[in-house]
Image (cartoon, rainbow, N blue to C red):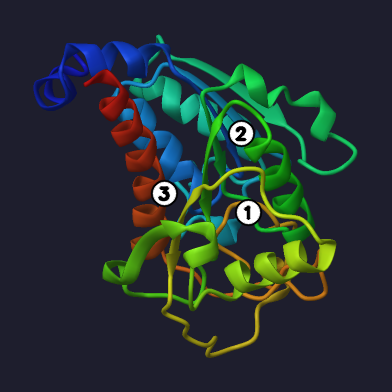
Amino acid sequence: MFFSRSTLLLGDDAMQRLATARVIIFGTGGVGSWCAESLIRTGLRHLTLVDFDTVSPSNVNRQAMATAKTIGEAKVEAMRAHLLEINPDADITAVNSVYNADTADRFRLDDYDYVIDAIDSLRDKVLLIQRATASSACLFSSMGAALKSDPTRLQVAEFWKVRGCPLGAALRRTFKRMGCRPAKKFQCVFSEELLTNKRAPAAEDNSQETAGGDNVTDASPINKPHTNGSLVQVTAPAGFTLASLVINHICQAAR
């Protein structure tokens, strides 16, 4: 039985709720991909993955589905195939699309119990936060995970209490400039650690890496994320932490 160890710890009621919960993850990069894997390995069965990018060589150091064999494949398709190898009975939908003002209406967020934001692009992240907090779904969000090497410094806090994270600060400035706030509170995974790159990015590193929660540290101008160094020992724990927020929320509802 795949989930016997999960059931021992969480109990039958929580596992049933986990099996019927519907989760959508925006961004399947260094954070989102590990969040997806953690959820499926724990017992989630209904998952939608949204990302527009393809696997590049620079993804191999930190993304769950990125291997020498998957380079060039759509990230969501490679991730779906990887997750179905873990649980062939899982219901996994791969949406090869960017989330932005032109596509947002295609996503019926009220159809989901949980929305995971692992997007880097500031403008698109603001829009997703606005739409998700106005929906009936519960939102959990990843702040920047690049330029960090110490996973023990990862924290969880409500959005307006995130400190020391340039992406979080940029989001707060944007909401204040727009004269609006998210419709409801939501929890974020972040770290105050901030290192610096020791070299300039190679040409291949400047590809379409604008989704995944592990690239941006300061999104100015508004929709041009910077390429920064990032490591799996931080991005994966950030993804696992996002997954734990979903699982613990489900367990609390089952009590």
Q: Which amino acid, by three-letter code, is at mark 3?
A: Gly
Name the foreground residue: 139 vs 3.
139
Residue 103, horizontal then vertical, whole percent: 84, 34
The quarter holding residue 234 reads bottom left
Spot occupied by residue 155 in the image (x, y as percentages of width and height):
35, 63
Along the polypeptide, which appears first: circle 2 or circle 1?
1
Q: Left or right of 120: which side holds 145?
A: left
Q: Which residue is mark 3?
A: 239
Near mark 2 (Cα within 10 A), the count class, few <14, some 14-19 or many ≥20, is many
Task: Return the x and y of residue 48 as percentages of the image width and height.
Answer: 58, 25
Residue farthest along the right direction in this orientation: 102
Q: Quadrant of the N terminus?
A: top left
Q: Nearer the viewer, residue 207 or 178?
A: 178
Nearest to viewer (mark 2 / mark 3): 3
| Element on which disc 2 rests | helix
- Residue at the image position 70 percent from the left and 54 percent from the top: 181
Q: Amino acid at mark 2?
A: Val
Query: Residue 229: percent from the left, percent from the top?
Result: 53, 74
SS type, badge 1:
loop
Q: Residue at x 47, y 82 (%)?
A: 194
**Residue at which label 1 appears:** 56
Q: Please name the residue shown 45% across and 30% down the image.
A: 82
**Which quadrant holds the C terminus?**
top left
SS category of the residue bearing label 3? helix
Looking at the picture, which amino acid does disc 1 mark? Ser
Using the rendered image of the protein, determine whether residue 80 is visible from the camera's viewpoint.
yes
Q: Which residue is mark 2?
A: 76
Cα–Cα gap, marks 3 and 1: 20 Å
